[in-house]
Every structure is written in C-alpha cells, then in structure tokens.
Amino acid sequence: MAELLELNESLYLAIRQNLLEQIDLLRRLETVLSRRFNEGKLLIIKVIFGVSSGEVEFIE
C-alpha cells in the first residue's frame, strides 16, 4: 500500500499492533462478540484503511 508504506515505519507498526490487540480484546472480553465468534457466527476482519487514499490493507 503506497500511502501506508510512506508512513514512518514505526508509526505503521504501532497502528498494526494496535489493530491486532484490539481484535484480540474483542474476541476475548466482549461476551456477545466472543460467543458469536467462537460459534462461527461472526467474522472479525483485520483491516487498515488509508483515509486520504481510500486504500485498504487486510491483515492476517
């Protein structure tokens, strides 16, 4: 992603790590979401969105 690669690398890594930690919290701490996720009824997609460019990066 051109826009994201232009960011300071440490800033990008911080954004990515925050995304991963927030998804982990959603899966573990939010009872309704975690139950639906564990039942296979909810899909949580990890995405970084470049606001100015509209680019989307899916994170595995």
Image (spheres, grey):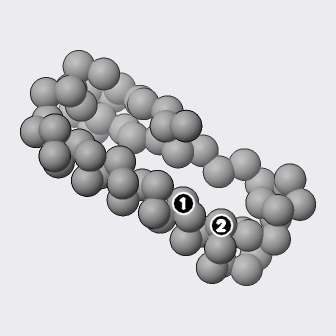
x and y, in percent, of residue 47 in the image: 47, 41
> Along the line of sight, which residue is nearer the eye, 3 or 13?
13
- Would you say 21 lies left or right of 51 here? right
x and y, in percent, of residue 40 in the image: 86, 53
Relative to residue 59, is residue 13 depicted above or below?
below
Q: Residue at x 17, y 48 (%)?
A: 11
Relative to residue 9, is residue 3 depicted above or below?
above
Q: Alpha-carbon distance for marks 1 and 2?
A: 6 Å
Q: Residue at x 20, y 27 (%)?
A: 5
Q: How many residues crowd around disc 1 within 10 Å: few (fewer than 14), some, or many (20 or more)?
A: some
Q: Residue furthest right?
A: 39
SS label for mark 2:
helix
Report how many numbered discs are placed on residues in the image. 2
Label 2 sits on residue: 27
Relative to residue 3, is residue 45 depicted above or below?
below
- The kind of residue tagged 1 is Ile
Q: Quadrant of the N terminus?
A: top left
- Would you say 57 lies left or right of 1 here? right
Quadrant hosting residue 60:
top right
Q: Residue at x 24, y 31 (%)?
A: 4
x and y, in percent, of residue 29 in the image: 63, 79
x and y, in percent, of residue 14 in the image: 25, 53
- The kind of residue tagged 2 is Arg
Which disc is residue 23 wearing?
1
SS label for mark 1:
helix
Circles 1 and 2: CB atoms closer than 8 Å: yes
Q: How many residues crowd around disc 2 within 10 Å: few (fewer than 14), some, or many (20 or more)?
A: some
